[in-house]
Image (tube, rainbow, N blue to C red):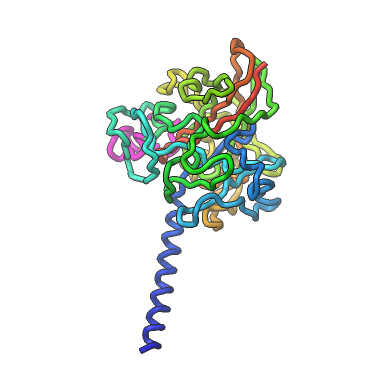
Amino acid sequence: RLLVVNAYSTIMHKKMNKVAAVLALVVVVRVSGHGSVLYPPTRNAIDSTLAPWKGASIGPNNTLQFPQTGHWKYMPFGCDCSNGTEPCESGQGCFWFSQGCTIGCGACDGNGERISGRNVCNSTKMPTNNDPKYRTSGRNVVPGSPQDSTRHNPWRSPGNAPVSDACGLAGGTWWAQTLGGDFNTTKYATLGDKGSAVLPYRPTGVTWQRGGVAKPTWYVRANHGGGYSYRLCKYEPGVNVTEDCFQKTPLDFAPTSRIVFRNGSSVEFTPTLLSNGTTPEGSMWAMNPIPTASEYAQPCPQRSGPVDAPTAYLRWGKNPTDCSGTWPTTLSIEDTVLIPKDIEPGEYVLGFRWDCEETTQIWQSCSDITIE
């Protein structure tokens, strides 16, 4: 009897392991999008100065992974990234965001669950971004139809969906969740903290000129399409920045951007820019240039693949090329933005807002700069 029981236990254990492996693969495929600004350095990446994130690297051959954020139960992974030939000091910067945010609503609910056509507040607002040229998924679906599963998600009306905080929440939510987020507590923040309230002023030494151009850089850790905007808010000691303040000074893009690879090589491309149906009215947004697969053309023609890519649980997957995929960690995106001529000189916070299309998530960061 003991032998029979042991044999049965062994068989069941193997079956459970197979089931767990399959579930793990499913979870990895459905991971939340993550990303953040690299330059100017952000307040959100302040823990890059702390162990275990200080000095983290994917290595010269893309064989290493960054320290993992999150409990093992909630699909942990790190903010793996590349910054050309320079160190990629990301800390937990890609874990500051808002989620459960849909267009036409007054607040986000913090829930990262994936439900097709999810509408957090039962809003009747229709999507304003419907031209396939600006879509990062579902380009062949009739806009606003029941089959249009992303119709309520942030990128479908750029800038309209609410956020939980102007600089994002630590972990994107108030409770850890597999399809939402988690956060490793540091002396700076814990899960659910508001970035505008807890992240310290972080002088970067970056100075931009009125009437000039600037070149902020960001990275995609886990790709969920959509698009993004850069905004400015005047820095006032002791006063938290707000989304309303950022929306008063959105920056325009110049029609030139670059993909920068970890070996320092780069490819210039023309960003896909959108100004119709955006919030604030007429504000300029750039579509995420990195496709997850073949939804639209990658900005780096003649790139080959597949390429190894760090996923979650310290596992590895594949990107179609080194300029596309769900985990494009071997590149960064350098944009060119225009600084208004008539802006008052002084200290500012640069806000980055990435509205996802495939999920109800919005990635955010805040950087301290000077404008002269």
Q: From where the camera sits, is residue 21 visible?
A: yes
* Up/down of 233 relative to 56, above or below: above
Q: Position of residue 42 (x, y in %)?
A: 61, 33
Q: Quadrant of residue 211?
A: top right
Looking at the picture, tell me which residue is in the foreground, 98 or 24: 98
Q: Position of residue 190 (x, y in %)?
A: 51, 43
Indicate left or right for 49 with 23 as reference. Answer: right
Looking at the picture, tell me which residue is in the foreground, 79 or 358: 79
Q: Position of residue 35 (x, y in %)?
A: 54, 40
Q: Is residue 182 magenta?
A: no
Going 55% across and 44% down the picture, which residue do you hit?
221
- Would you say the magenta stretch is mainly helix, strand or loop? loop
Q: Which residues are magenta?
A: 130-152
Going 51% across and 51% down the picture, which residue do you hit?
70
Looking at the picture, tell me which residue is in the foreground, 247 or 139: 247
Quadrant that contains the N terminus: bottom left
* Up/down of 97 relative to 214, above or below: below
**What number of labels is visible?**
0
Q: Quadrant of residue 112?
A: top left
Q: Quadrant of residue 110?
A: top left
Q: Is residue 140 magenta?
A: yes
Going 61% across and 29% down the picture, which residue do you hit?
201
Quadrant that contains the C terminus: top right
Q: Position of residue 244 (x, y in %)?
A: 46, 21
Going 62% across and 45% down the picture, which residue do you hit?
330
Q: From where the camera sits, is residue 257 visible?
A: no
